[in-house]
Amino acid sequence: MNIYPELLERLIEYFKKLPGIGERTAERYALSLIKLDKEELKDFAHSIDEIETTLRNCDVCGHLTDQKICKICEDSARNQKLICVVEDYKSIFMFEKTGKFNGVYHVLGGLISPIDGINPDDLNISKLITRCKDLKKAEVIIALRPTIEGDTTTLYLKKILSNENITITRLSYGIPMGAELDYLDILTLERALYDRKEVA
Ligand SMILES: [Zn+2]
């Protein structure tokens, strides 16, 4: 038996879809929404609506943005010849939290994994090649998870980018095997970036 009005039940079900949120927390969130003032509630609803209508991928790097080109790619103070290649946008937020990276990014949108049917063509790689061709003497830092898929992708990128006039490095191996970059603490990530090595 549903004890809440249907609308509240619906909100509770949506909150439960979010990571780490169980029944009780979802109930608390749904009930708290009622207490927001009218304007806040409208703005909250509008923001959710905009996820679908406004958020998109940057034309240059593939990062999440609400513009054609993201703030990082547009920032002339950043080193456009230092490209950090990441699996997804979550890693960018991690790197940005360190505050120590002044280059730009390239989001692959996944890792090569033949078992899962993910091939190089399924990833945002051709745009990376184009970017590298346009730059002279750039450095590409490959910052992927130290897993079989991460390593396969790193070696593939090394191979296809080796014709371009660029240095290819990867994060140092201080990162625990199999670790998700977004769960690393900021200091570990900073060190991995600082100690980066050229891909052999
Ligand atoms: Zn961008």
Image: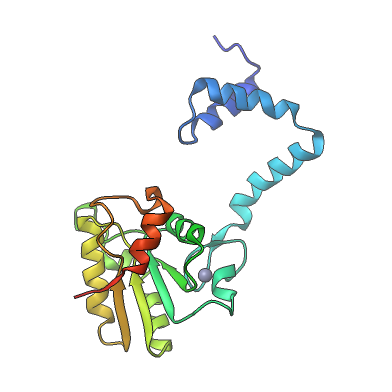
In this view, the residue farthest toward the top is 1
Left or right: residue 135 compared with residue 168: right
Place of residue 51 in the rendered image (x, y in percent of width and height, measured from the top left): 60, 50
Is residue 9 something that shows in the picture?
A: yes
Pick the front one: 85 or 47: 85
Q: Which corner quadrant holds the C terminus?
A: bottom left
Pick the front one: 174 or 6: 174
Place of residue 108 in the rendered image (x, y in percent of width and height, measured from the top left): 38, 65
Residue at 21% in and 70% down: 155
Q: Is residue 131 above or below residue 19?
A: below
Q: Is residue 175 above or below residue 47?
A: below
Pick the front one: 132 or 2: 132
Left or right: residue 1 compared with residue 110: right
Place of residue 20 in the rendered image (x, y in percent of width and height, measured from the top left): 46, 32
* Quarter where residue 133 is shown: bottom left
Q: Which corner quadrant holds the N terminus?
A: top right
Place of residue 160 in the rendered image (x, y in percent of width and height, measured from the top left): 25, 79
